[in-house]
Amino acid sequence: MEYIKSMRWTLKPEPNKVIVNTLAKALNVDTVIASLLVQRGIETFDQAKKFFRPSLTDLHDPFLMKDMDLAVSRIEKALAENENIMVYGDYDVDGTTSVALMSSYLKTKSAQITTYIPDRYGEGYGVSYQGIDYAHDNDVSLIIALDCGVKAIEKIAYAKSKGVDFIVCDHHRPGDELPDAVAVLDPKREDCKYPYKELCGCGVGFKLIQGIGSKSGQSINDLIPYLDLVATAIGADIVPITGENRVLAYYGLQVINAAPRVGFKAMLSHVQKETLTITDVVFMIAPRINAAGRMKHGLHAVNLLVEENLETASQFASEIEVYNSDRKEADKSITEKALLQIHQNKEEDKYTTVVYEEDWHKGVIGIVASRLTETYYRPTLVFTKSGEKLAASARSVKGFDVYNALDACSEYIEQFGGHKYAAGLTLLEDQYEPFKQKFEEVVASTIDKKLLTPEITIDSAIELEEITPKFYRILKQLAPFGPGNMAPVFMTKELQDSGYGKCVGADDKHLKCKVQKNGTAIGAIGFGLGAKKDLISSKQLFEAAYTIDENEWNGQVSLQLKLKDIN
């Protein structure tokens, strides 16, 4: 059986008891629930009301965003004068949903709208010269760039020299200089006073259509149908699900469940689940949208997301299904080869994972980097050949800034970009070995060694008898879960297996059992924990860290523990 890395369990500090008890009384909930809320910064009845009942009236005025007035008036001018407008965005989920959102909205006001997604292999991320030339050759006078553009200084200057205006909607950190665009909408701009800084690219795009709409007499309710795209991008782009993002995700999920767009309907036709959560969106919808850009072209995803005819959408969806299964095969076989390479080179005990093979599929190296991080839990780079150069995807472990580590190796790198936990880079082939050595040295000398053991953060220690249907019903209302509001993790000590615990799944990878204590028993499943079965045999006592969810089996719904780890 495969080796399982040990985990660090960290129990969150107990919040102030007086505040917890006061809140529990005000809300008429037990102290465990009140404690979870206080840990999330919710201390009063009014804050709890906003949290449990997100309202569209809690969304901020779009004109609080720097340059919003400039962006809206430039778009109004373009619409009034029948200019050709190009909506431009990256080939990932945030980019393609942004393009679908903006183009389908603008098409309700003008027929002169075209879309552009750069080719992952020919152009790479962000604004491209090729895209600008295409716009210029087709008499496009305004480009709206979404989820990219804040660092495209030279390219936007080039567009200006060709008579093409730019509006940038981005959420990445700007550099020292901003591009010379008509408007740069980015809540992370130093001079932007917008109250919420954590929107994704599609979220910034939504604020822009909210701004345009408000000028033409539309209310927020008219824009609700677009929120399914925003919720998908929020989930896929791993932005915090707090504040405004929580409101957008909450209503977006309602749209996905009650009145999904035709493209979503086509993608989900095989899913037998009554209510989709943000996690379902991340694991069912997002990989399919991503697969188009990884295996073929991102425009296929946009076409599916804006399609209004179910028959055509179903055809697009089945093509995307093929891309997705090709992506799965590629990612599985490359991961196996990469693990073998690490083993053959005897690199299991290093502080970093850096692997390279010239024919690995560029579209899946990011996923492979994530898989390798799961196995060895250390900063990871997966390289492949891209034209004359080598290209890599980087992934990090919680608490370690891989972007800064790459910056410290910049003498060997042609170009790189990204953020704390995920980045991309290119370098010349003869720089690969010296770079690999330097990256190992930088990480070895700067990483806090405890970060190399995965951490489970536990919200609260509870007893099994506290897990009642009412408790779970309230717990569910803390959703949508994600960064900044993770699904609560609980811990219970001195558990016993009922005696029927067993390994299930391919290679006996998972652990299924029924845990009991003080006369209360509850079913449990531990994905990837098959190797720990011996810890629960012969009625020995163990402790478990877990989340709580529902298990549907033959029409019966029961509560179950999803084990994260056992000791």
Image (cartoon, rainbow, N blue to C red):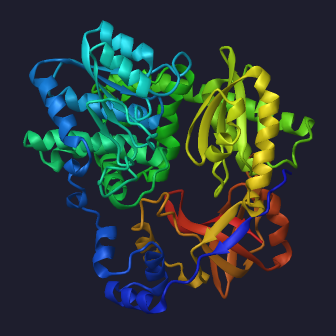
Q: Considering depth in this image, is 513 or 192 the residue closer to the camera? A: 192
The image quadrant of residue 403 is top right
Q: Report x, y in % for residue 196.
A: 34, 56
Closer to the camera in the image, 556 or 53: 53
Q: Is residue 528 above or below residue 407?
A: below
Q: Is 502 placed left or right of 348 in the picture?
A: left
- In depth, the one of 527 and 191 nearer the eye is 191
Q: Visible in this render: residue 465?
A: yes
> Does residue 424 sit above or below 251 in this rendering?
above
| Closer-to-camera residue (369/250) | 369
Quadrant occupied by the C terminus: bottom right
Left or right of residue 433, residue 520 in this image = left
Question: Residue 137 in the image: x percent, y percent?
Answer: 32, 6
Tell me which corner region of the image, top left, top right, bottom left or bottom right, holds residue 38. bottom left
- List the single residue furthest toward the top: 137
180 horizontally vs 420: left or right? left
| Residue located at (13% from left, 30% from top) | 76
Q: Position of residue 401 (x, y in %)?
A: 63, 51
Identity of the residue drawn at 45% across and 56% down = 240
Task: Name above or below for residue 452 compared with residue 293.
Answer: below
Q: Is residue 281 visible?
A: no
Q: Residue 539's spot in the image, x, y percent?
A: 82, 78
Report the residue that reaches farthest toward the left: 217
